[in-house]
Image: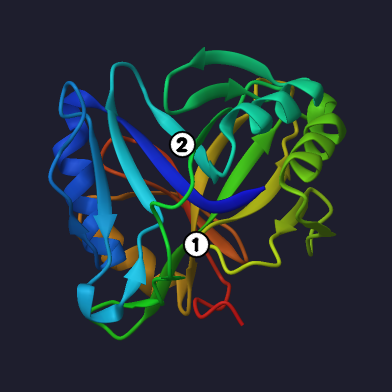
Amino acid sequence: MIRWVWAFLDRPTQRFDDCAAFWSTITGTQLSPRRGDNDQFLTLLPDPALFAAAGVKMQSVHGLGGVHLDFDVDHIAAAVRTALDLNAELVANHPDYAVLRSPSGQIFCFTPSGRAKGRPAPAFRAPDGTLTRLDQVCLDIGAADFDVETRFWADLTGWRHTPGRLPEFSRLRSEETLPVQLLLQRLGEDRPAGAHIDLASSDIEATAAWHQSLGAGLVQRHEHWIVMTDPADAVYCITGRDPNGV
């Protein structure tokens, strides 16, 4: 059902330009022209020489923003019906896309397939030679909702579900080559579901230092990942995974 996946970074209007420049720099992408009724959308475009398809978009929003997923599908109405049967909620039904909410509150969209084709962009080499790749959206799920939300996303995507190396994490991985995969994190508290971006890095400390020089904030260090904030104070993580996806 799912032909392509977009990580959508929703950022506050007053900080949007700073955030767009930051994410463009750390992913080695170019900013597309703004589009939408209020010039609120843009895409992070890989270098044309890579012959790679984009997988990240941004939206200027009122409020704090966050992260959501767009799934390109062949038949939006059928995808909506499937999601509703899995206890999703329809938020808005537009002529060419639909906005929904997962059982625990995570926003996602169904969008028309066919606009994105090709292979995802490879890892980006930072000025110090460190490799990184924005390749994962982490769904942050309250403890009481974790099992229900996990079943929802597994059934909706049809992707392979596997445990993570820590008990509070699990993964959903597509058999197809897509730019974004899913990590599910069980929080130690009950709250509506949310999401953040994960970047794979060949050296998490070096990547964190470079991002800080560009305006990011360092929140907390863990053994295998570092929690950061971008120029709009939105949380993301630099994780010790192979940026080449091996």
Report x, y in % for residue 200. 50, 68
Along the horizontal axis of the image, is 245 left or right of 190?
left
Q: Quadrant of residue 209?
A: bottom left
Q: Residue at x 31, y 77 (%)?
A: 51
Report x, y in % for residue 192. 65, 20
Q: Is residue 219 above or below residue 174?
A: above
Q: Residue at x 69, y 61 (%)?
A: 174
Q: Nearer the viewer, mark 2 or mark 1?
A: 1
**Residue 189, numbered label:** none
Q: Is residue 245 above or below residue 227?
A: below
Residue annotated with mark 1: 179
Residue 23 in view, yes or no? no
Going by the numbered disc 2, the residue's amino acid type is Val
Q: Residue at x 26, y 83 (%)?
A: 128
Earlier sequence position, callout 2 versus callout 1? 2
Residue 33 in view, yes or no? yes
Report x, y in % for residue 34. 15, 39
Residue count near mark 1 (Cα–Cα under 10 Å), binned few <14, some 14–19, many ≥20 = many
Q: Residue at x 42, y 21 (%)?
A: 95
Along the horizontal axis of the image, is 173 left or right of 62?
right
Q: Quadrant of residue 104?
A: top right
Where disc 1 sits, the SS reads loop
Query: 96 or 224, which lies in front?
Result: 96
Along the horizontal axis of the image, is 102 left or right of 27?
right
Along the horizontal axis of the image, is 186 left or right of 75?
right
Q: Work out how far the residue at label 2 is from the one at label 1, CA to CA, in angstroms.
A: 15 Å
Going by the numbered disc 1, the residue's amino acid type is Pro
Residue annotated with mark 2: 67
Query: 32 or 162, which lies in front?
Result: 32
Where disc 2 sits, the SS reads strand
Q: Quadrant of residue 131?
A: bottom left
